[in-house]
Image (cartoon, grey):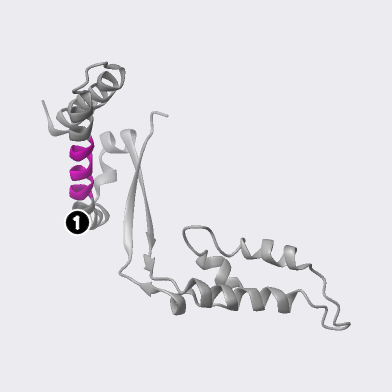
Amino acid sequence: MGLQEETFEMLKRLDEAVHLERSSEDPERIIRLIHIGYVLNEAKKYITSLQKEASNLLLDSEWDQSPFMAQQFSMETKTGNPRKKWDHKGLASVVAKRIHDRSIDIDTGELLKSAEEQIGELLEYASPSYWRVTALRELGIDADAYCEVQEPITNLIYRSNDD
C-alpha cells in the first residue's frame, strides 16, 4: 500500500471513529472524543509547519505534469499578510470621517446620507473579525498603518476533480 492509500485509509478510519463515538452511549466516549480532538489539533500543527515547505516544493516542481495528478487534483494558491493588533478605534474614526465627507454634496453642502446609512456603510469596510483591506484601500486608507503586518502566508487549496 502506497503513502496515498495509507493516508486515505487513516482518514477513513478517523471518520469512522468519529461517527462511532457520536452514536455511542458509552460514558467513556467523552475521553475518546477528547483524544480524537487532540489528534486533530496535533495534525493541524504538523500541517501548518509543513505548509510553507510544501508550497515551495510544489510550486518549484512539475507535479501537475503527471497524468495521474492532473486527473486527480488541481491546486490553487492564495497569499495574504496576516494582520493583528488592529487599532479598531482609530481606523473606525478615519473610516467614519471619510464616509461622512463623501455623504455631503460638494455643491450644496446638503447631507445626502443619514447617520444610520453612514454607519451601515461602515460595515462595507469592516467585519466583526477583520477589516476589509481592499475596501479600505478604495477609501485611500492604508490598512497596514492600523495593524501589525506579519510575513505572508500561502495556503494550498486542494480540490478533488471528482466533484
In the rendered image, the vertical position of residue 76 relative to residue 113, given as above or below: above
Q: Left or right? Give the position of 162 relative to 27.
A: right
Q: Nearer the viewer, residue 31 or 110?
A: 31
In the rendered image, the vertical position of residue 126 relative to residue 27, given as above or below: below
Q: Where, quadrant-wise, is the C terminus in this rendering? A: top left
The quarter of the displayed image where residue 101 is located: bottom right
- The secondary element bearing badge 1 is classed as helix
- Please report the residue visible at 28 percent of the width from the left and 37 percent of the height from the top: 69
What secondary structure is the magenta-colored segment mainly? helix
State the extent of the magenta-drawn residues as a range. 37-47
Q: In the image as oriented, which residue stretches furthest toward the right?
A: 108
Which residue does the numbered mark 1 point to in the structure image?
A: 53
Expressed as whole percent of the image width and height from the top left, the position of residue 42 reads: 18, 44
- Please report the residue visible at 47 percent of the width from the left and 61 percent of the height from the top: 130
- Please report the residue visible at 82 percent of the width from the left and 82 percent of the height from the top: 106
Q: In the image as oriented, which residue stretches furthest toward the front?
A: 27
